[in-house]
Image (tube, rainbow, N blue to C red):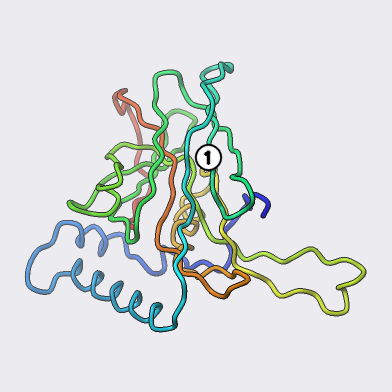
Amino acid sequence: MTALNLSQPQNAPRTRHNMSHFTQRHAASSSGSMTTSSMLAATANRRTAMRRQRCCSVAAAGVIQRTGVDEPVPGGVSRTFAVDIGGASPAKVSLKYPKDTTAVCIESARPLGLVFAQRVRGVTTEIYVDEIVDGSNAAAAGARVGDVLRLTTAVFLVSAPVDVTTWLNPPAKRNVKAYYECDGKSFDNVMNAIASHSVEIDTPSGKQVVETVGMVFERQGAEEGAAKEVKSVQV
């Protein structure tokens, strides 16, 4: 399978339609016998049970690992990552990092329990972890408040190549594992990429449920400075 990094995830639910900013923030801090958080958890459990009742197998979204060493580039260093999206060999992705930052790779079960926000720092727009729900899957995986999201695994709807032998009977579109680079992308598109993990992928043996999300963060100790928050949503 070749590496896929498309401009926008396909067949993914619109996160902002499904998740109200105010409702989700309330879910992270509320308590009681029947809070928004518990209702969301119950819904997720029901969906998981329904998926398993359909006898679908389970697939990981893809393990992401650092490879090689830092390569000096103007204004920082280039760091390479191997993203396992189900092919014969992992896809190789290189991202530029400031010198005083650390690259962090995590793989978290869903739901993540993260609140992402977008801010403008100078001429750069970045999506970062604004809050982490206590005891959440992402917290256990190692995510921290302030981590900047650089890449996430995703699920894309793609078409197989059509040639002279198949144009009369073109192959059906398939949902496949992929990765999505977040630099320079809109907040909604990045949230859609994360939300796309709810879509089952197509394999020769049938449908597979994607239960984990792989992410690459940029972690830094510098002060936030004059950063303007633009949007925020929990996933």
Relative to 169, say whether 15 is above or below.
Answer: above
Q: Residue tagged by mark 1?
A: 183
Residue 122: x and y in percent read 44, 28
Residue drawn at x 19%, y 61% as measured from the top left: 26
- Residue in view at x 39 percent, y 19 percent: 100
- Quick one: label 1, few (<14), some, or many (20+) residues within 10 Å? some
Picture quarter with the N terminus:
bottom right
- When the figure is inspected, residue 17 is found, relative to residue 132, above or below; the finding is below
Farthest right residue?
Answer: 164
Q: Is residue 198 left or right of residue 86?
A: left
* Residue 187 versus residue 142 in the image, above or below: below
Q: Position of residue 28 (x, y in %)?
A: 20, 57
Question: Which quadrant of the view contains residue 142?
Answer: top left
Circle 1: element type: loop
Q: Nearer the viewer, residue 74 or 135?
A: 135
Left or right of residue 177, residue 170 in this image: right
Residue at (45, 18) in percent of width and height: 99
Closer to the camera in the image, 93 or 39: 93
Is the C terminus in the top left, top right, bottom left or bottom right quadrant? bottom left
Label 1 is placed on what type of residue?
Asp
Q: Position of residue 223 (x, y in %)?
A: 29, 24
Examine the image and state in which quarter residue 157 appears: bottom right
146 displayed left or right of 34: right
Instruction: Tell me which residue sits at (44%, 67%) in the image.
Output: 58
Q: Nearer the viewer, residue 30 or 124?
A: 30
The residue at the far left in this view is 32
Task: Please give left or right for residue 50 compared with residue 63 in the image.
Answer: left
- Residue 12 lies, in percent from the top left, at 51, 66
